Image (cartoon, rainbow, N blue to C red):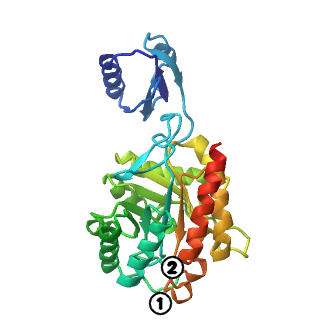
Amino acid sequence: MVAVLKPGVTQQQIDNLTAWFKSKGLDVHISVGQYHTILGLIGDTSKIDIELLEGLDMIESVKRITEPFKSANRKFHPDDTCVEIADGIRIGGGHFQLIAGPCSVESPEQILGIAESVKASGASILRGGAFKPRTSPYDFQGLRAEGIELLLEAKKRTGMPIITEIMNQNHLPLFEEVDIIQVGARNMQNFELLKELGMTRKPILLKRGLANTLKELLMSAEYIMAGGNNKVILCERGIRTFETYTRNTLDLSAIPMLRELTHLPIVIDPSHATGIARLVKPMALAAAAAGADGIMIEVHNDPQSALCDGAQSLTPDQFRDVAEKVRKIREVVAQ
């Protein structure tokens, strides 16, 4: 249920009404906008008399919400959420970011070289896998803790905040200096992990599962937000369909649809979606035109020798070209 308050309501009135709702066993999410304050009521609202609420002088309107996701719902939070990643770097609410780097951290020379090149081309956040979930147990699984150390060294050298994927809540102590924790597609419904991340206050990039609906993605975001962490960024990275020419099918319609449903920032990953380097550029441009808040692209200095996902990785020169075109597309869309 959502209660929209009239302009000019005092803080004391809000506190009194909030206390009353909590006495009814409800959690209250308060969203203060430019013109209205909105109280989102979470819990069993069946005992709340809507007509009674609407009769209060401070209430403008009351609406019941049928969607099971509450905190992530735009009805609770009409304004776009802006997630602060680092000083001067924000995503969402009109702030756009390019995220780039290798699928997997392989060596100090590799990650430092790529970090410097993508930063020079306009990327503001460095990605790199330290823990790698692989379909085969015999494939390269990442450098793990050493990989995070190398990412942190690249962060010191370039000043770029870093994002890397977590596989297990037991690894959280290793992520203390990581700026954004990524939850991969395979862990989108690892609810115990999501609960633990909800108790952190770090930005979380939540990837859509290979065969999950947008509603399921938002419900996973709700797990994190229910723990008190509202710094959630959604990522569309392609879903599995009957098409075999691409690795996955990039669902660009997710951008406008999620924009209607939620206030959370939306990032697109065209690398994992297509699995083919030459398709990354057109999909990145399409995502920028559709209004994505960020684009995450895999970049490798030598894709043919990459230990992981070389076929979908761009070279630094190719990334520079994509970054320039994305900027131009965004300028056109903004007009």
Measured along the vertical axis of the image, is residue 24 above or below residue 197? above
Residue 154 rendering spot, x and y as whole percentages: 34, 72
The answer to whether 211 appears left or right of 242 in the picture is left
Residue denoted by label 2 = 300
Q: Neighbour class for label 2 at 10 Å: few (<14), some, many (≥20)? A: many
Q: Neighbour class for label 1 at 10 Å: few (<14), some, many (≥20)? A: few
Q: Viewer-proximal residue, 327 or 230? A: 327
Specify the quadrant that holds the C terminus: top right
Residue 321 rendering spot, x and y as whole percentages: 60, 68
Which circle marks residue 184 in the picture? none
Decide if residue 98 is in sight here. yes
Count all numbered tags in the image, as a single digit: 2
**Secondary structure under the numbered disc 1 in the rendered image:** loop
Decide if residue 128 is in sight here. no
Q: State the separation of the CA atoms marked 2 and 1.
A: 22 Å
Residue denoted by label 1 = 138
Determine the residue positioned at 41% across, 56% down.
204
Determine the residue positioned at 37% across, 62% down.
161
Measured along the vertical axis of the image, is residue 97 above or below residue 135? above
The answer to whether 333 appears left or right of 231 in the picture is right
